Image (cartoon, helix red, strand yellow):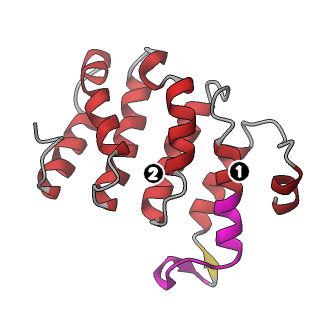
């Protein structure tokens, strides 16, 4: 119940516990609740970031590939990548890397969003505290480029031009 609590501290502690304790059965039982936290747009960015990292840990623990069915979650994850918060984007990009490193099929709608993130970073459209020696969030740039390497080259000319 703490995962779905309205108290941010309880949610964060529950997500940390879920990510670090238990095995494959535990992961399968709680994955749906963690997915709902990631998907809930009204949840604070810190909690959504922790939920994305928690879900990545659960995916690594579980051998069940059906936790994130590409037909359902490919487009949803692409929509989530329109996020403005850099911390949440970092968590979602890490989650995407964990998923597409096994199989990218179904997650192709994420490619234009990843390119949009790179474009936004190139234009330095980030808060000042995310600048590192004049470079906007180099750690997110690396994660986005790493995620893109798992996909074939985009066919859309607009995406290719931006890239």
- 57 or 161: which is nearer to us? 161
Q: Which numbered tag is attached to residue 81?
A: none
Image coordinates of residue 59 in percent, x first then y, are: 42, 27
Residue 139: image location, x then y, percent: 57, 62
Q: Is residue 130 left or right of residue 25?
A: right
Residue 52 location in percent, x, y?
A: 39, 44
Residue 109 quadrant: top right
Bounds of the magenta segment: 116-133
Q: Nearer the viewer, residue 131 or 39?
A: 39
Left or right: 100 in relation to 60: right
Q: Earlier in the sequence, mark 2 or mark 1?
A: 2
Tag of residue 91: 2
Residue at image position (63%, 84%) is: 134
In the rendered view, tell whether residue 141 sits above or below residue 71: below
Residue 18: in magenta span? no
Q: Nearer the viewer, mark 2 or mark 1?
A: 1
Element type at mark 2:
helix
User: Secondary structure under badge 1?
Assistant: helix
Residue lying at 25% horizontally and 27% vertically, measured from the top left: 30
Q: Is residue 35 above or below residue 133?
A: above
Residue under numbered circle 1: 112
Residue depicted at 66% across the width and 29% down the height: 104
Asked if 34 appears above or below 129 in the picture, the reply is above
Marks 2 and 1 sit apart, C-alpha to C-alpha, by 18 Å
Determine whether label 2 and label 1 are within 8 Å by CB. no
On the rendered structure, is 54 left or right of 114?
Answer: left
Image quadrant for the C terminus?
Answer: bottom right
């Amino acid at each position: 119940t703490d995962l779905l609590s309205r108290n941010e501290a309880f949610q964060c502690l529950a997500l940390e516990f879920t990510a670090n304790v238990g095995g494959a059965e535990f992961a399968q039982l709680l994955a749906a609740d963690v997915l709902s936290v990631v998907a809930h747009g009204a949840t604070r960015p810190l909690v959504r970031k922790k939920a994305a990292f928690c879900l990545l840990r659960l995916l690594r623990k579980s051998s069940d590939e059906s936790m994130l069915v590409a037909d359902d979650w490919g487009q949803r994850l692409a929509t989530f990548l329109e996020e403005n918060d850099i911390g949440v984007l970092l968590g979602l990009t890490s989650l995407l890397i964990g998923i597409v490193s096994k199989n990218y099929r179904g997650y192709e709608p994420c490619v234009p969003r990843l390119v949009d993130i790179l474009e936004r970073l190139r234009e330095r459209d980030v808060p000042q505290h995310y600048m590192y020696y004049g470079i906007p969030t180099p750690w997110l740039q690396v994660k986005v480029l790493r995620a893109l390497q798992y996909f074939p080259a985009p066919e859309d000319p607009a995406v290719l031009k931006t890239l």
